[in-house]
Image (cartoon, rainbow, N blue to C red):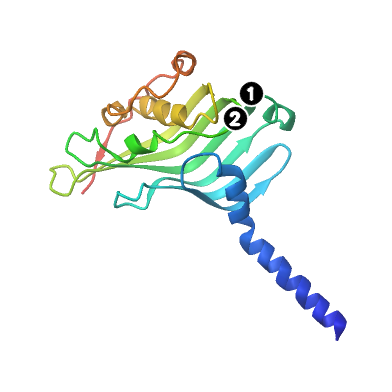
Amino acid sequence: MKVLWSILFIFVVTMFVWLVKDSVLSHFIFRKIDLDISATNMWISPSNIKMDNLRVKNPNNFNLRSAFSSKKVTVDYNYTDLTSNPGYIDQITFDDAFLTIECEDQVCTDNNWKELIRRKSSHKKNYVIDRVVFRNLTVEVQMPRNGIEPKKLKQIPYLELTQVVSDKGFPIQTIIKKTFEQADLQRYSKGFTQLYSEREGRISRRNTSLNYGWLESQ
């Protein structure tokens, strides 16, 4: 009987650990990035981090739940380089990604990403990301309901940012700003303040706009 209870106890503990694993790992990985981020099926190894269904939650004052999502995310690194200062990351890959811009006015200078880009990493050390890759990125613009353009869609098969850096903390602001520039979304980033450093801008200007067209959708 004791053996049976021991097996049952181990089973219950194992199931509990498995159920809370993603929440614990999400908190460990994202705790110093000032964004509400969640993911499932997370796996960490000495050379990469893999996760499914990553979501960046919208600020509470917006209608849509998510600002960004990706079905699969892979972070490749060398452990020694990652733990150095600055920390070096070889590549972050977002597969089947979806970016939503929710506009508060017709010119869309006020939108959810204008608020999200104000969030800052609280990491004490700097990071350098060699490449940030988006494969099969869909951009959706949600205009106000009383507008003449309720929705726009843009499909981008491949988008790459190179040498993404920060002067302090994880370069989330630089990733956002350079993604908008590279994806030809400057109309929606006019409200962004100069939150990234001259060093970040100087290095990331290697990226060029790809000029993908819009698909009108009701």
From the top left corner, tell me how far across and down residue 44 is, in percent.
68, 45
Q: Give residue 86's mark.
A: 1
Q: Amino acid at mark 1?
A: Pro
Does 17 sit left or right of 200 as displayed? right
Label 2 sits on a secondary structure element that is loop
As drawn, 132 above or below 44: above
Task: Give yes or no for contact between labels 2 and 1 (Cβ–Cβ under 8 Å).
Answer: no
Q: Amino acid at mark 2?
A: Lys
What crowding class fits label 1: few (fewer than 14 Cα within 10 Å), some (14-19), or many (20 or more)?
Answer: some
Label 1 sits on a secondary structure element that is loop
As drawn, 177 above or below 103: above
* Residue 4, picture quadrant: bottom right
Which tag, 2 or 1, sits closer to the chain's start? 1
From the top left corner, tell me how far across and down residue 23 is, in percent.
58, 55
Q: Nearer the viewer, residue 191 or 163?
A: 191
In the rendered image, which quarter contains the N terminus? bottom right
Q: Which residue is mark 2?
A: 124
Identify the residue at horizontal 33%, vertical 29% (top origin): 212
